[in-house]
Image (spheres, rainbow, N blue to C red):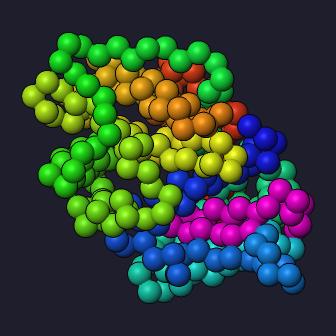
Amino acid sequence: MSDDMQHSFWHVGDLVWGMYQNTLFDPRQNVRLWENGAGELVGFAWRDKHGTCVQVAPEHRHDSELLAWMVAWGEMRQRGAMAQEGAEPVYTVTAFEDDFPLLELLAQQGFRRDEFYMLHMRRDLSQPIAEAKLPEGWIVRPVGGEDEFEQRVDIHREVWHPSKVTLEAYRRMRDIAGYTPECDFVAVAPDGTFASYCICWLDTVNNIGEFEPVGTRPAFRGKGIGKALMLYALRRLQAHGMQTAIVCCVGSNEPAWRLYESVGFQTYNRSFDYSKRL
């Protein structure tokens, strides 16, 4: 993985999943782009219910003026939500723990670090990948045709309850450039039940594959099903020419990061929430 990715929040999969996982997110209202005089993208800010995330091109990481504009845009949007929707008078920005230019700006503006943080993990796909081991009669495969879409949505909604993912949104996402149907995997029990699932996203420019989202139904956890699913998916990423796999999870979710570590992922950075009252 290049040094540029050390402070990158966004894989192409994050962008597609973030915009199309439900029909409620409006990128025209919640994503702002910044360009230089030549019309080249130098950064963007993304706002959702969790807070604001700012992403700048590596060569602009120390541009304090650009960072200030991006943070100010997020605050303006939060104040608008407070007036229109009764949102909490708290403004949150996400930052990597070693992104010192952004951290300095946030400190100057009175932000304080919250307890919530995310682990950013990676795996070198040139290293050996163990064989996926499943109980007899189980199989890992891509989601099939239209007749399986509802069950695929149901497993996501059960794992991530409450979820805004709908059948309509899932159908729409499957038609979006960047989504690869053969990388939308499910672990299927002998009776046809979807027990675990993940989507893998392909960055064919940097050869980085991402897992987003990953989940196992509560009734099937602790049985090695999620691990077998991920090992299978890692091999498929390798077959697609990916050199690195990445995944993120909430730092307090020990079962998740233990699973990821068990298939070879290691933490390469952490991002924290920084908040202030408005």
Front residue of this view, candidates 86 and 136: 136
- Let me know if residue 75 appears in the view: no
Residue drawn 63% across the image and 81% down it: 76
Q: What percent of the width, then of the height, locates residue 160?
A: 32, 47
Point out the stretch of residues depicted in magenta.
43-64
In the image, residue 241 sits, relative to residue 104, either above or below, namely above
User: Is residue 277 within the magenta segment?
Assistant: no
The quadrant of the picture occupied by the C terminus is: bottom right
Q: Is residue 234 left or right of residue 161?
A: right
In the image, residue 218 sits, relative to residue 165, either above or below, namely above
Front residue of this view, candidates 11 and 205: 205
Image-quadrant location for residue 31: bottom right
Front residue of this view, candidates 190 and 268: 190
Residue drawn 14% across the image and 52% down it: 147
Residue drawn 54% across the image and 38% down it: 240
In the image, residue 8 sits, relative to residue 122, either above or below, namely below
